[in-house]
Structures are given as C-alpha cells and as structure tokens.
Amino acid sequence: MSASIAPIVTRFAPSPTGFLHIGGARTALFNWLFARRHGGKFLLRIEDTDKARSTQAAIDAIIDGMGWLGLDWDGEVYFQSHFAARHAQVAMDLLESGHAYRCYMSSEELAAARADAERERRPFRLESPWRDCSPDAPTPDAPAVIRLKAPRHGETIIEDEVQGRVVVQNAELDDMILLRSDGSPTYMLAVVVDDHDMGVTHVIRGDDHLNNAFRQLGIIKAMGWPEPTYAHVPLIHGPDGAKMSKRHGAIGVEAYRDEMGVLPEALSNYLLRLGWGHGDDEIISRDEATQWFDLAHVGRSPSRFDLKKLENLNGHYIREASNGTLAGLAAPRIETLLGTTLNNAALVQLTEAMESLKPRAKNVDELAEGGVFLFKTMPLDMDERAEALLEGEAPDLLAFLHASLAKVTDWSAEATEQAVREVAEGRGIKLGQVAQPLRAVLTGRATSPGIFDVLVLLGRDESLARIADRMTT
C-alpha cells in the first residue's frame, strides 16, 4: 500500500496595521487558488503581535476585503498574539538543546560593534561573546535576549517554486533574536512556530520575505521540523517601475470597491493576471482559475499595475453582470448624489435602465452618474456642456419636439424615434442636432444612454414635462 500524501495547506498572514493592501490581496488569492486546486486548506492568520500598531478596524478591513473578493478560509481566524506562550516555549526548547543562547550584550556594545563594521566597510554580523559561553559561566545581573545559534559554515539552499534555486552562505546569516529581554517573542520566531503548528506545507508570499526564509530555516532545522515548500512571488510595481505605493493611487482593496466602483470579479481577474498567465487568456473566471492555477507559471519579474487595463476588465464584468446586481450597487451612490432614498419603484426603474447604462460604463460610479437623471426633479440642474446645448434656437426646437412627441401613444423607442426624426426632417437638420438639446433637457448632461432609451426609461409624462420646462411657449 502506498503512503498517503499529506494535504496541502497554505495561509495568508497579514499584519493588521491598515487596509488590505492590493499586493496582499494578490498573495491571498494565489494561496487560496493553490489550496483549492489541490483540495487542500487555506488558512487566515492575523499577525497581531505588534500591539502598538495593530487595530480592530484594520482586522475588520482585512476580513471584509477577503469576503468581498470571495476568498473564504478554512476554520477560524488564527490570531498570532494568542500563542505567545507557545512561541516562547519553542525558544526555551532551542536554548535547552544548545541551538540558542542567552545574550547579555548591552545596547552600547551592539552600537559599538555596528560602528566598527561601518568604519571597516564590512557587513555587520553579530559576534556575541555569549554565543559559546559555558552554561556554568557567571552572568551579569542584566536583562538578556535569547538568540538563535545560526550556522557559521556551509550554505543554505532553497528550491523556490518561483525564484528557482537560491543559495546563501551561512556566514551571512545572523544570530537573530528569538525572545526579547522582556520575554516577548519576535516575529521571526512566531511566524515559524505558527506555520509549523498550523501544518502549513506551502509558504506563498512576497519576495521581500525571501531573505527571511533563510533565517527562519535555522529555527526549522534546529527543531527538526519538516521544511515547507517556498514560493516567493515578485512584488507589484507602479507604472513607473517603483514599488506600489500611495503615490501611485489607491493601494487598498476597499478604495477600489468604494471609491472607484470596481467589481470583485474584475479585481480578482486582474490580480490573477498580474504575475501569472495561462496562455493568451485574459478573461478568466474563478472556476477556471481554480482549475488552472499553478506556481510554475508565476513570473519572476515584478508586474506593473496598469489602471487602464483594470478599468477595461471592469467594463467587461459590468456588461456581464445582472441588471439587478448592478442596480443594487449603483443605488447607494445615486442616493448620495441626490441626498434622498430610492423607493422600490425607483429601484425597479433603475434595474430596467441598466441594460442601457452598462454598455458604456467602466465602473459603478459611471453607472450611477449615468442613471441619476431618472430621479431628478424639475427644474433639472444642468452641467456646463448641457447648458450650452440649450442656447440659441434650442428652446424653439424643443417646442416642436414636444408637439411631435405628445402625439405618440405607443411610447416605445421605435415610436419616439419616428417622432424625433419627423422634427429633424421638417426643420431640414440632422438627427443629431435635434437629439443633443433633447438629451440635455431630459438628463441635464451632454452624454447619456441612447436618447430613445432615455425617453422610454423616463416615460411619456416625465419626458414631456422636462421638455416643456425648457421650451419656448
């Protein structure tokens, strides 16, 4: 009988010091997809050991963002701070086994050692006099930290699933602190213990953690624990090639949802393609991504964030979305624009309008801005371009339009178009010259869905009333 294969376990481990970063969202997505493809588990760990910077609002934002993106996790949320005693116990086990030592170097001694290295223009590597002291040696009456005894000779090799083989000489590794002098565990210790205790088999994270992996392996090897498979993914860069930051625009997931009107399907699809590919496929559903995702096709080079590509992708998903879903997303934004609440009849009307609004919209804001005209009251406020369309002979033209449209009994796009065309032909002008002032008086804007769709959506009485409000009597 063949031995059973251990299930794959991945994790996403954000620090709750702010929003869900766009790079973190991609890391979470890659971990989720890898686990789901292989029938494994995806775990969520909140690394909240930095109590001074960790906030409940940030924890809520991370969990909310994960839910919005459809990245569900297995089991409960794991909070790193709840396991400080376990982390400390591992440090004591390493001390007992001789793989760690108590270091009594003062801050002044450490500063002097760093200054010597800087003066001699060499990398600083701690040479603690306490590393190889006999356990029976006298110790000062001073606080001590517990440091890992990093190997001094040979090399450490990581066969990274993304970066390939990476080799570091052990002489470059430092004796990192495991427990601070107050007994609190460091992040470097906690993350290793947590990954082991949670059964994490694959550590998929940003390549800014690659150097940490070599240091963390010192703990893993000293404890005799199985080494996880590493996959260090390149970071996301801005359009200028620099690491993604606030100066490039929104970097929190909630900003793409709340401020930019991006759909979760669009952002997920875009993040998936930002560093991973499946042939020439650009539109990839969640089901397809779950079937196809692998680490072999994650690129080694940083990807550049392109807002235009995201907007185009978002436009695709808006066109694919149901009218009811889009109306539900646009309604709160319209209510904000109007300063009022939409009733059920208005929501039905907005849902019907989506078929005309969504072909030209690239985000939910554009849907709201395009549909707000339906619920305005007279006299309509006009934007500058719309007001310009109502100058000159436009009021007279509107009077002709009102007379022609008032005769229409079958209020359909076809019937209203015929009525408008009759006015254009009777005045000897092009249809567009008639449609533009009509659009302005009906919507208050110079752009809108097709003018005959607008007439139908507003209905006969409201359309005629809006025209009459600005025509010459």
Image: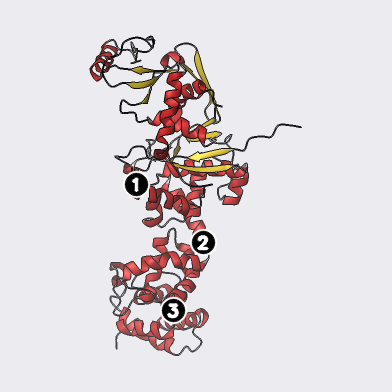
Amino acid at dot 2: Arg
Pick the front one: 383 or 202: 202
Nearer mark to the viewer, of 2 and 3: 3
Residue 345 tag number: 3
Q: Dot 1: what SS?
A: loop
Vertical placement of residue 250 versus 211, above or below: below
Amino acid at dot 1: Gly
Give the mark nearest the N terminus, 2 or 3.
2
Vertical placement of residue 403 versus 110, above or below: below
Color scheme of the displayed model: secondary structure
Residue denoted by label 2: 319
Image point (36%, 56%), residue name: 259
- Mark 3 burial class by Cα count in 10 Å: few <14, some 14-19, many 20+: few
Residue 145: % across, % down: 33, 22
Residue 34: % across, % down: 57, 41
Number of numbered discs on residues: 3
Residue 147: % across, % down: 38, 20
Q: Dot 3: what SS?
A: helix
Give the mark nearest the N terminus, 3 or 1.
1
Q: Evaluate whether residue 40 shows in this view.
A: yes
Q: CA distance from mark 3 to mark 1?
A: 38 Å
Q: Residue furthest right?
A: 1
Pick the front one: 425 or 329: 329
Residue denoted by label 1: 249
Disc 2 to disc 3: CB gap under 8 Å = no
Give the mark nearest the N terminus, 1 or 2.
1
Residue 283: % across, % down: 56, 50
Q: Evaluate whether residue 446 shows in this view.
A: no
Nearer mark to the viewer, of 3 and 1: 3
